[in-house]
Amino acid sequence: MAPSNTAQLMAEFIGTAMLLIGVVGSGIMGETLADGNTAVALLANAIATGCMLYVIITTLGPISGAHFNPAVTLAFALRGAHPKAQVLPYIAVQIAGGIIGVWATHVMFDLSVFQTSTTQRTGVAQWFSEILATFGLLFVIFGGLKQRPDAVPTLVAVYITGAYWFTSSTSFANPAVTIARGLSDTFAGINPAHIAMFIVMQVAGVLIGHVILKRLFAD
């Protein structure tokens, strides 16, 4: 029996919340233990995020498709692989889940729950980076689904772990994650004033990916 719409939305909410717990929590822990070594903190952040992605995609994928990302939901909808009526509900619970995940992480580390980030992440280099990061994520997802569907959790986890290092923006590639990270003045944060352009670039990555990948990985 196919999962109900309620189960799908619950899976997207919980999965996105857990993703942000992994991103923000590992950033806080990494920065605390790295004693000022940003490279070590970023390595810890990347590995923990990749581990969390593997877990949530594997466990929740059969329920909701394991999007946890409005960009992914939009990409599937453009390909006709996700009902258009479910696009806005998916995006709403992804954003809500991400925010709750950030607040829960603040409680876990005994920080002020309600924050806004002061971390500057802006400029043409980082904007272009977000186009490439989002395109790359969709390349991995749709290429994996075409060639090795069982390997998609591993492929996404490995890609994001690496993309933290080979993109100048550290590969947000996710509007829900971008919004949520604006509410945490910690290692993983982004100044809220810089969120809009990140999201614009992520959507651009989706549109470019739609044109290219539907041909590259055509049925």
Image: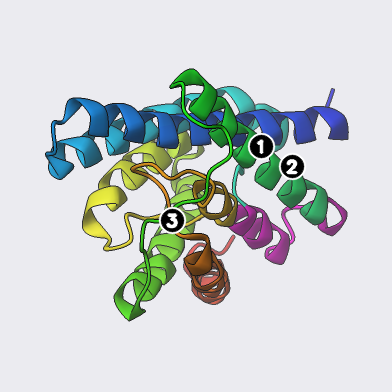
149 drawn magenta: no
**Quadrant, the N terminus:** top right
Question: Looking at the image, do the residues carrying marks 1 and 3 touch, with CB atoms under 8 Å apart?
Answer: no
The residue under label 1 is 97
Residue drawn at (46%, 57%), measured in percent from left and top? 173
* Residue type (three-letter) at the residue carrying disc 2: Val
The residue under label 2 is 93
The residue under label 3 is 190
Residue drawn at (45%, 46%), measured in percent from left and top? 144
Q: Please tell me which of labels 3 and 2 falls first in the chain.
A: 2
Residue drawn at (62%, 40%), measured in percent from left and top? 99
* Residue type (three-letter) at the residue carrying disc 3: Ile
Q: For this view, does 212 lie left or right of residue 59?
A: left
Percent x, y of residue 47: 29, 32
Task: Give residue 147's mark.
Answer: none
Depicted 129 relative to depicted 185: above or below: below
The residue mark sitting in front, 3 or 2, is 3
Depicted 93 relative to depicted 127: above or below: above
The region drawn magenta spans: 70-86
Looking at the rendered structure, the secondary structure element under dot 1 is: helix
Please, what is the dominant secondary structure of the magenta stretch? Answer: helix
**Quadrant, the C terminus:** bottom right
Looking at the rendered structure, the secondary structure element under dot 2 is: helix
Looking at the rendered structure, the secondary structure element under dot 3 is: loop
Question: Looking at the image, do the residues carrying marks 1 and 2 touch, with CB atoms under 8 Å apart?
Answer: yes
